[in-house]
Image (cartoon, rainbow, N blue to C red):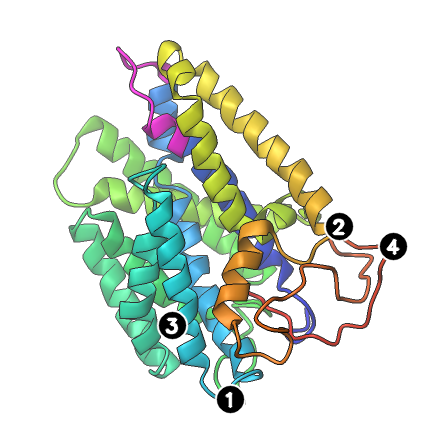
Amino acid sequence: MSLTAGRIRRVDALRGFAVCGIMLVNAWQQTVRRAPTSLDWVMTNLFQSRFYPMFAFLFGLSFALFLRSARRRTRRPRVVMLRRLAVLAVLGAAHTLIDPGEVLLPYALLGALVLLPASLLPRWAVLLAGSGTLVASVLDSHPYVLITALFLLGLAAAPGTEPGRGPTRLGGADGLGSGPFLGVVCGAAAVLAAWLTWWWNHAPPGGGVYQAAALCGAVAYAAAFLLLARRATLFETLGRMTLTNYVTGTTVIVVAMPLLEADDTGAALVVLAAVTVAAQAVFCRWWLARHRYGPLEWVWRTLTWWGTSRGIWWGVETTGQTVVRDPRSAVPDPRRPRPGDQPRDRA
């Protein structure tokens, strides 16, 4: 895939896959039942903590891609990035009124405190810092240690962020890995995840065994998804509207909480997650066929670039489609193909 034409579609698709899993896990985590069920075992051992690592890694990768895009539009890309993070922090602070355990505000703060300074370092230094923090995350079970490590690793994995440096053979054109490499990673991570999960269940040790099992599970799921999802248009549309889907998903959970807590089997939360994701997928495809960005994504982007970009008139940017029709795209706009003369945001 060309790194200069359009969005990086596998990044969108994997982000959409992660959002689906996060919706299910969030519904389960916020529901209190009287007694454990078989669903609790499945969620704990197969789903919990398996999706937010993907999201964290992609946040770091998208951070680098946005900086690269911003360099073509402004002389001060990091100032624009700081504004982007500030807007995200405000949205996150508002979102805490709905979900006190939300992640937008912490992600924005970590982005400003960790990723922004790290973006000044050479790739090898970011990779070294991320690897060291990843080792530390196994010893410290606090999830934000792992999130910090994955932020840095995602930043280091982003392709073409250094002048004169293209994609790597193993990382592929988008930093997410090539076929044979993904196959090896998927198999190794799946074996490690199964062994660590068995160990944690049969002889719970100290340290971060569960954290390591969850991380290996996340790597296995992500690699398997990238290998199998050749036509992941459903997930691609969900991934392009991640912010909108995350906020609406938690809102649905809060509204449906009485129903979820009244169901001791846990079946209601599975149905709720499936119905919500299906509705979001339909809405995303409908919306993106008519608009270039999701509702909250448009607000985020407009406030980020307010008054700083030639493509924004008086600080207000249209949400209409502005790209040439791509028959391979998840959301082509057959009615209004226009010249692709505006900068494109890949974050």
Residue under the point 40% across and 33% down: 25
Q: CA distance from mark 2 to mark 4?
A: 9 Å
Q: Earlier in the sequence, mark 3 or mark 1?
A: 3
State yes or no: residue 238 in magenta. no
Q: Earlier in the sequence, mark 1 or mark 4?
A: 1
Q: Earlier in the sequence, mark 4 or mark 3?
A: 3
Q: Is residue 230 left or right of residue 247?
A: right
Residue under the point 41% across and 61% down: 87
Q: Amino acid at mark 1?
A: Pro
Residue identified by numbered label 3: 82
Q: Position of residue 194 (x, y in %)?
A: 36, 37
CB contact under 8 Å: marks 2 and 4: no
Work out whether residue 224 can be spotted.
no
- Element class at badge 3: helix
Residue identified by numbered label 4: 335
Q: Is residue 333 left or right of residue 39?
A: right
Q: Earlier in the sequence, mark 1 or mark 2?
A: 1
> Which label is found at residue 163?
1
Mark in the foreground, 1 or 2: 2
Residue under the point 74% across and 60% down: 321
Q: Position of residue 3 (x, y in %)?
A: 63, 74
